[in-house]
Image: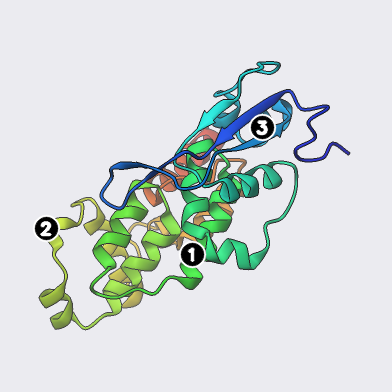
Amino acid sequence: MISVGNEETADVKFEVGGTAESAKGRRKRAKTPTTIFHAHHIFLRLNAPALADMCKPGDDSPTAISNVRPEIFKHLLYYCYGGKIDKDDLQSDAKDIIEAADRFGIVSLKLEAEACYVDTVELTLDNIVELVTYADSKNLALLKEHCLDYLSSANKIEVAKKVSFDDIPSHLMRDLMVSLARREGEGSSEGDTLSTMRVSQLRHLAHEKGLTVDGSREMLIDAIKESEEGDETES
């Protein structure tokens, strides 16, 4: 079994760290030095395609990776080699892992970290806009649904007082209406059951059809409908 970080057999290497993104979006020099990681391109091609595209097998110069902490990158490589990240690490670093997994195309890890983040994040009317906007920007459909479910169940007077809907992308209002309808027990019209399915159900259905499970709620529904229409055409 090929092990993670085996310098003798590795054909790519990365220099990770050096710079990090500040809270206000400005780049700053990290306090710790960069860390060198060795890997095998074939594992990256299979499990982290975007990362594989960044490097060339046999290149003597390391590929520089910024805005990712070395310990997070170590988790990613371990996962690419078939390892399972410890639950405590996944919980404590969920958001950083989501960011890195999304960046490097490690879809299954992104979804695992998202589910963990949903289980641990504390939603309030003060942070709901920031979180639902973040979820939308990263196509974190489960987190977005969680945020909108919270918003639809909150005291409407308090929501009106504390939540700035001007700062929420307008296209999310449709998802909010779905959340409200589901909460109030309203069914979908014309037999369109997909429109009121939960994200977990849509992802399960997409997986059964061999479709990607990464993407927004709308993307999942469109892909499933297109697949079903194709099946009907073939039959």
Please name the residue that numbered disc 1 is placed on: 117
Residue at image position (46%, 36%) is 66
Toward the viewer: 7 or 50? 7
Please name the residue that numbered disc 3 is placed on: 44
Q: Does label 1 or label 3 sit earlier along the sequence? A: 3
Q: Does label 1 or label 2 sit earlier along the sequence? A: 1
> Whole-Å distance between the Cαs marked 1 and 2?
26 Å
Estimate the x, y position of residue 163 in percent, counting from the top left: 16, 70
Residue at image position (40%, 51%) is 217
Estimate the x, y position of residue 13 in percent, counting from the top left: 66, 28
Q: Is residue 62 above or below residue 73?
A: above
> Whole-Å distance between the Cαs marked 2 and 3?
41 Å
Q: Which mark is residue 227?
A: none
Q: Amino acid at mark 2?
A: Asp
Residue at image position (69%, 18%) is 57
The image quarter in which residue 92 lies: bottom right
Residue 27 left/right relative to 91:
left
Q: Amino acid at mark 1?
A: Tyr
Residue 234 visible in this rendered orientation of the protein: no
Quadrant for the C terminus in the image: top right
Q: Is residue 72 above or below residue 64?
A: below
Toward the viewer: 55 or 138? 55
Toward the viewer: 205 or 164? 164
Q: Does label 2 or label 3 sit earlier along the sequence? A: 3
Please name the residue that numbered disc 2 is placed on: 166
Tag 3, which secondary structure? helix
> Whole-Å distance between the Cαs marked 1 and 3?
25 Å
Q: Amino acid at mark 3?
A: Leu
Residue 45 left/right relative to 177:
right
Estimate the x, y position of residue 27 in percent, counting from the top left: 33, 40
Tag 2, which secondary structure? helix
